[in-house]
Amino acid sequence: MDCKQYTAAEYKSDQPVRWCPGCGDHAILNVLHKAMATTGVPPHQTAVISGIGCSSRLPYYMNAYGFHTIHGRAAAVATGFKLANPQMTVWQVSGDGDGLAIGGNHFIHAVRRNIDINLLLFNNKIYGLTKGQYSPTSDRGFVSKSSPYGTTEDPFIPAELVFGSRGNFFARSIDVDLPVAQEVLVAAARHRGTSVVEMLQNCVIFNNGIHNYITDREFRAERTIHLVHGQKMLFGANNEKGLVRDGFLLKAVTVGQDGYTVDDVLVHDAHTQSNFLHQQLAMMDGHDLPLAVGVIRDVESPVYNEAVEQQIADVRAKKGFSTLRDMVLAGEHWEVK
């Protein structure tokens, strides 16, 4: 077992980073290096796989195995890579366009299978690399180069897709909140199975300020809530507000007003098997209720690649196969002369 203590610098490549100045990807890359150092998985046991898009340049900036694949297929390639190399830690990087449009089907099935990969979804609600078309997460009415009069469709909400696909790990962070970003990336790496981390990221060129309503320091404490397993769901500049039950719904209250005390505030349980409350928390958007960041769901479930490995071992033991040749020649066969 490798007992070396790695530093963030050891996960950085020697390639110049080619993102626009001010792009949120810079902060995410920086915190990913730190998270990898925290988990302690050696660079030579790490693979970073991406699709196509601005965020998908990330493998070039990692001192690890990397694969810059084709548009929308990162999840499929990551699945195959993990099955063939179960000892490797696999990070998959996609944007909201790459991951949820052409790659949407691969995304939901990777989550459904629960293969042991860490899926980072960079969500800036725009196609940046192709110069500003609306994406599957763009809001209804959004004006872009491909929707000059506003979109006439509702967006995907990534969390909703994860829960609809029976996901077992979902976390969220924003590019300007580095401590929470590192916290969720470390938790994702330590989770067995598919972990999905939505990173709300700013595109300074084509969608600048899209997340300002939650990222600006003036509003962030009131419009976001940092969820931590086992802790009260409190938020606000002085943690003076909290989430309580209102029938089957959630409600934000001020502690000490209208008869509410801190005892009424819910405690976050990220490990409960039921996703009912997890989905409600993940769907909060910062308007009526604060947007949830942190680890929202983290539960155990059978892992796809482990089940495949065990199945292969069981069949080998039962049939007496040690190689593919043994298997091919075990049944009826003939020789051509």
Image (cartoon, grey):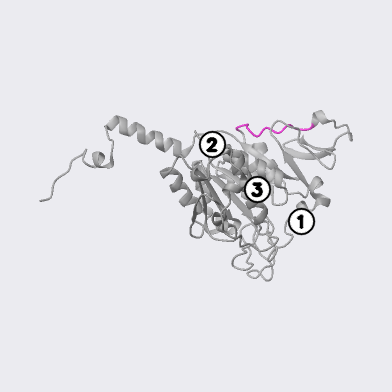
Q: Nearer the viewer, residue 50 or 45?
A: 45
Q: Position of residue 109 (x, y in %)?
A: 50, 47
Mark 2, residue position: 192
Specify few, some or many for label 3: CA neighbours under 10 Å numbering under 14, 14-19, or 20 or more. many
Which residue is pictured at 63% across the width and 32% down the height? 271
Structural distance between the alpha carbons of marks 3 and 2: 21 Å
Mark 1, residue position: 212
Q: Is residue 268 magenta?
A: yes
Which element carries disc 2, helix, strand or loop? Answer: loop
Q: Nearer the viewer, residue 230 or 90?
A: 90
Q: Is residue 148 visible?
A: yes
Could you tell which of marks 3 and 2 lies nearer the N-terminus? 3
Could you tell which of marks 1 and 3 lies nearer the N-terminus? 3
Q: Position of residue 63 (x, y in %)?
A: 54, 50
Residue, far left = 337
Which residue is pictured at 82% across the width and 42% down the height? 236
Give the amino acid at mark 1.
Asn
Q: Is residue 74 above or below residue 259?
A: below
Specify few, some or many for label 2: CA neighbours under 10 Å numbering under 14, 14-19, or 20 or more. many
Q: Position of residue 24 (x, y in %)?
A: 68, 56
Which element carries disc 1, helix, strand or loop? Answer: helix
Q: Position of residue 217 (x, y in %)?
A: 81, 51
Q: Is residue 177 left or right of residue 254?
A: left
Q: Which residues are magenta?
A: 265-273
